[in-house]
């Protein structure tokens, strides 16, 4: 068991040394993606507090990409010299410490991703239940979705208002099913046949 763990650790270190830039870029991209999701969930005002974290992640991605480009030619020779210069005991300590820190960081990232996915799933389920639960849109939801305007001055008006609050002009009634304006005295919508409100 101990030899299996030791071989696995050496394989992880070899993989990281060969693909260090790609591994770091993927890690910073994941953190940036989680930050963008948190910014989206926080709204415009709350998103401002996440901007420094996002900027650091993007800057780190650029720095790693530039470092990879610069070290591409002589990176293998430098790594082999460093590997021979470091003693086996010191290398083992560094690897164990790096693995421990990497496991902690990975655990924190996974926990954060689990929480974010759980919240997202709950919000999607709530939105889907709300959407499926209403068989027909209400007059208010249709008016808000279509953003009604006063026919006289084109000012946006509140759903259900009888007069424009900008010019005082009387406002038409709207169909509760399709949202079209109803003619004066109409008992049914001439577009979808729904019963007009107030009849």
Image (cartoon, grey):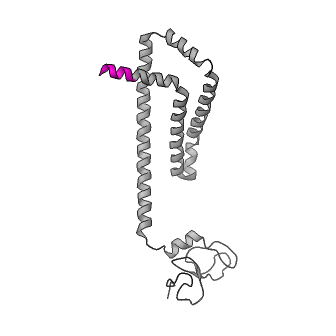
Magenta segment:
1-8
Q: Nearer the viewer, residue 12 or 167?
A: 12
Residue beneath the point at 43% across and 70% down? 134
Quarter of the picture holding the N terminus: top left
Magenta stretch: includes residue 197 = no
Q: Quadrant of residue 71?
A: top right
Q: Is residue 4 left or right of residue 57?
A: left
Q: Is residue 26 left or right of residue 172?
A: left
Q: Nearer the viewer, residue 114 or 68?
A: 68
Q: Position of residue 55 (x, y in %)?
A: 60, 38
Q: Position of residue 25 (x, y in %)?
A: 55, 33
Residue beneath the point at 60% across and 88% down? 184
Overall secondary structure of the magenta section: helix
Magenta stretch: includes residue 5 = yes
Q: Position of residue 137 (x, y in %)?
A: 48, 73
Q: Is residue 60 above or below residue 9?
A: below
Q: Is residue 7 above or below residue 140?
A: above
Q: Quadrant of residue 169?
A: bottom right
Q: Position of residue 121 (x, y in %)?
A: 42, 53
Residue beneath the point at 44% across and 32% down? 105
Q: Nearer the viewer, residue 43 or 7?
A: 7
């Amino acid at each position: 068991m101990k030899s299996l763990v030791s071989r696995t650790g050496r394989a992880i270190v070899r993989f990281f040394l060969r693909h260090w830039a790609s591994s770091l870029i993927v890690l910073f991209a994941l953190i940036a993606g989680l930050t963008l999701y948190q910014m989206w969930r926080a709204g415009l005002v709350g998103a401002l507090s996440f901007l420094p974290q996002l900027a650091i992640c993007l800057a780190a991605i650029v720095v790693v990409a530039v470092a990879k480009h610069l070290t591409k030619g002589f990176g293998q020779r430098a790594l082999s010299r460093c590997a021979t210069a470091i003693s086996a005991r010191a290398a083992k300590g560094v690897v164990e410490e790096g693995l421990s820190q990497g496991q902690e960081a990975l655990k924190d990232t996974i926990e954060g991703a689990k929480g974010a996915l759980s919240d997202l799933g709950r919000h999607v389920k709530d939105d889907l239940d709300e959407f499926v639960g209403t068989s027909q849109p209400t007059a208010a939801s249709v008016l808000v979705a279509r953003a009604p305007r006063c026919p006289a001055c084109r000012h946006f008006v509140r759903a259900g208002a009888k007069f424009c609050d900008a010019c005082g002009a009387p406002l038409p009634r709207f169909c509760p099913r399709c949202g079209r304006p109803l003619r004066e005295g109409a008992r049914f919508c001439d577009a979808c046949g729904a019963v007009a409100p107030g009849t």
